[in-house]
Image (cartoon, rainbow, N blue to C red):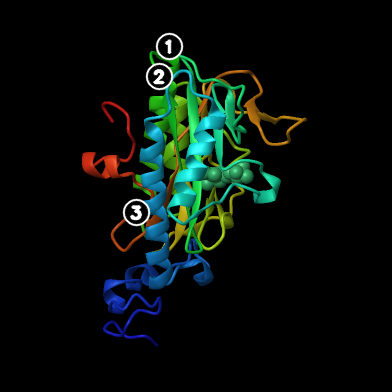
Amino acid sequence: MIQRNDPCWCGSGKKYKKCHLTIDARLQTPAIKRANPRWIKTPREIDGMRRAGRFNGRLMDYIRAFVVAGVSTERLDQLVYAYTLDHGHKPACLGYHGYPKSICTSVNNVVCHGIPSATEILKEGDIVNIDCTTIVDGFYGDSSETFMIGAVAPAARNLVGVTAQALIKGIAAARPGAAIQAVAQSIEPYVESQGCSVVQQYTGHGIGKSFHEYFSVYHHIDPDFKDFMLMPGLTFTIEPMINQGRFEVATDSVDKWTARTKDGSLSAQFEHTVLVTAEGCEALTLTPSQIAAGKIVCLEGM
Ligand code: MF3
Ligand code: CO
Ligand code: CO
C-alpha cells in the first residue's frame, strides 16, 4: 500500500499526499470510475505536450493578422504550412485520413472541417473558424478560434461570444476529481439558455502522441455517456461547436469532409488543448497575446 509521503504512483516526483491521494480517496466510494491509468501522461510527456501547445498558440497569433477581408482560405493554409515547416514542425491535418490541407477553415454555416480553397475569399460580415494542429517532436497541439471579418451582424457576433463563453465554462469545469461530464454540464444548459444548440456529431478528444486518442469529450449531455473522473495528467481538447439554429449536421457528399448545419444557420467553434493539473486545468494552446492579456480567448470584453 502506497503511503502518504511516498512518491506518487503517477511519476510526478511529488509526494502522494500532494498529488493523486485526494482523488484516490474519493474513489473509495466508487460512484464513478477512475480514468484509465494508461491515459495519464508522464511528466516527460506533459513537457512535450506543453511545448506542442505553446507552438500551436504562437502559430494562431501569427495567422491572426492575415485573417481579413479579401484573403482566400487557401492563402491562410499556405501561410500556416510555411510557418510550421520554417520552425521545424509538421502540420498534423495534412494527409490525416487523406485530408488534403494543413488547416481547417470553416466559414459561416460550416461547422468544422472546411477545406481551404483558392476560390473562397473571406468577406466583410463572415465568421470563420481556423483550426490548426501541429506535431512538435511527436506531440500534438490542437486549437481553433472563430474570427469575425470586419463588422458582422449582431446575431453572428452573439453566436461567437456564446461559443467562446462555452469554451471558457468547459475549461473551468475540467478539474481533478470532477466527472468528465462536468464539461458538458457546464456548456449545454448555458448554450441553450442563449437560444443556440450544441453539435453532437463531433466532440473533443484525448490527445498526446496521436491526434485523436481515447477518450471522447462530449459537449452535450448524454445519459448513456460512460463517465469517468478527471485526474491530473490527462490531456484532451475542449472544442464546442455551437449552432445558431438546430444542432444537426450534414457532411458534404462530394468532398466527404465539410460539415454544415442542416438548417443553414451559422456555426462557431473555439478549441484549446488542456491538461488537468493537481490544482485545476491548464490551457496548453494559449497564444502569446492571450497569455499577455490573461485571457483564454481573443475577444473584446471576454
Ligand atoms: N483539428 C480537428 C480537431 O479539432 C481535426 C481536423 S482533422 C482534419 O479535432 F483531418 F480534418 F484535419
Ligand atoms: Co482542432
Ligand atoms: Co481537436
Residue 133 position (above or below residue 125): below
**Tag 1's secondary structure?**
loop
> Residue 104 appears in which quarter of the rendering?
top right
What quarter of the picture does the C terminus occupy?
A: top left
Residue 119 appears at what percent x and percent y?
Answer: 62, 22
> Residue 160 appears in which quarter of the rendering?
top left
Q: Residue flagged by tag 1: what amino acid is it?
A: Ala
Q: Residue flagged by tag 2: what amino acid is it?
A: Arg
Seen at 31% across and 63% down, the residue is 278
In the displayed orientation, state which residue is furthest to the bottom. 1
Q: Which mark is residue 281?
A: 3
Q: Nearer the viewer, mark 3 or mark 2?
A: 2
Crowd around label 2: few <14 · some 14–19 · many ≥20 (10 Å): some
What quarter of the picture does the N terminus occupy?
A: bottom left
Task: State the residue in front, 285 or 249.
Answer: 285
Residue denoted by label 2: 157
The answer to whether the residue labelled 2 contacts the one labelled 1, judged by CB atoms less than 8 Å apart, is yes
